Each structure stands twice: as structure tokens, then as C-alpha cells.
Amino acid sequence: MSNINKYTPKDEAELHTLIIKDIDNLEEGMNKIQHEINLHGNIPDILCVDSGSRLSIIEIKLDEDRNVLFQGLRYYTEVERLRWQLANIYKASKIDPNQDPRIILIAQSFTEETKRMCMHIKPTIDLYEYSTILDSNNEIGTIFNSVPIPVEQTIPEIKTIDDFKNYIKKQDLKVIFEDTRASVKEINEKIEEYCTQSYVGYKYKKKQIAWIKTKRTEIEFGVLIREGRNRVEDYPKLTIKNEGYNKKEYQDLITNIRNSINVLK
């Protein structure tokens, strides 16, 4: 029986190394362009390109840090300005400079203030909380948990359902995307479906209860386990890459949505 223990990186530099090693665990098809590239004095932690050929700025913090969002935005401004030059310099990375860059923030945790601020920011921002583990072979691995950005008020729709669906390459995943939407909405007629910059969300009585995030070759289906109207206990999720996904975990997520609705009634 293998033993898995929590591992604490000794510093941010070691964490950078671990995340670069496991970059495909963060998002399938994510490729590193350069670590700590110097862009006129601005140095993002990792500059990447995702599976959709979009420049991705990754900013990492060892612990919770209120400044991580502002750093990411500062680097975004420079990358956005230089995206055509970067596409020309790193031709092998097949960057599409017609697409706006995205920001990926990684930290042990995020403050509620940071999450709320992300609601009002134009660039696409994805939040991930990391944990590092040590297995019985002394191999260190990194686990990434997507953190949904809360939506507590009506905001302009940035994308449409068709935008998210058409971003998926695989036809079978498009069918699963539509089936998942239907499964969530049929739980309760008062569930509201809405679009944000990075995912399709679901609310009940103005409180977020679930999300679907589409990528080129996978779908992320996640829920918020609510212990009260203003308290979330956990954010379980399931990554679906094909029709062979874990049906039990899927049904568990549906059950969690039903339970959250009962809490919010």
C-alpha cells in the first residue's frame, strides 16, 4: 500500500520547478515558453501557450498573497503589448497573437477579496490552489484545484453558451457538455444558467452552486458544497476527457448540487 504525505516546498523557487514539471496537470496541452522571461523589467513567473494557441501568464505564490492579482495584471499589460513580437520570436510555440492573453494565478489559497475583484476585471483570469505531495517513492507531485470566481450579482455576459461549446474540439465532449447542462438545470426550475469569461455558471437564489469549464480536449464540471448561504465547505470537480469518465463521481456532483439547493431553500 503506497503512502502519500503532504510536502511543503522550501521556497518559491522550488515551487516554480515543481509546477513546471507538472504543468500538464494544470491544463492538458499547456506548454511552457519560458520561465521568468524579462519583458522590459517585468518578469512573469512562467510564460506559456495553451492548447488553443493562446498566450498564458502564470503567476505563482507560495502562500496566500493579496498582491498576486496586481502582479498578474501588470505582466498582462506587457505581454498583451508584445504578443505579436512574442509570436514571431517563439514561432515553434505556435502562438496566436490575435487572441488576448489569459492570466493564471496559482497560490496555496486566495482571499475572498481577490476572488471578488476577479469578477470585475476584463482579462480572462483562472485561479488555482495548489498542494504538493510526496509518495512512497519520494516522488514529489503537484495537485491543482480550480477555484471558481464567485458571482453574487448580475454582470454582463462576456461569452455565450455557443462560444463555450464551439471551443471544444471533440464532438463527443460537445454532447457531454450539453447533457451536463441539461442535468444541472433539470434539478430545479429556479436554477439560473449564466456565462462568465471563463466558465458557464449555475446559481440558485443568487448563490453559485456549480460550473462547467470547457477546454479544447476536456470539460471540467465542478460544484460548490454549501454549508450555509454564505459558507462553502468544498469545491469538488470532475475532469471529463471522453465518454469513459467516472459516472459515480459525476452522479455524486449532481447529488451535491441537490444538497446545496436544500441548504439554500
Image (cartoon, rainbow, N blue to C red):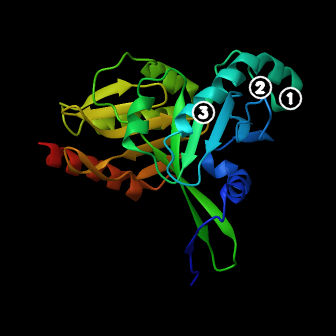
Q: Nearer the viewer, mark 3 or mark 2?
A: 3
Quarter-wise, where is residue 261 in the image?
Answer: top left
Rendered image: mark on residue 72? 3
Is the residue 164 above or below the residue 187 in the image? above
The crowding category of the residue bearing disc 3, from other C-alpha atoms within 10 Å (few below 14, some 14 to 19, many at least 20), is many
Q: Earlier in the sequence, mark 3 or mark 2?
A: 3
Q: Identify the element where label 2 is drawn.
A: loop
Q: Position of residue 130 (x, y in %)?
A: 55, 54
Q: Amino acid at mark 1?
A: Tyr
Question: Does residue 241 show up?
Answer: no
Residue position for label 2? 95
Quadrant containing the N terminus is: bottom right
Q: Is residue 197 left or right of residue 74?
A: left
Q: Residue 90, which numbered label? A: 1
Ranked by sequence position, the earlier of labels 1 and 2 is 1
Q: Alpha carbon of mark 3 to alpha carbon of mark 2: how far?
A: 19 Å
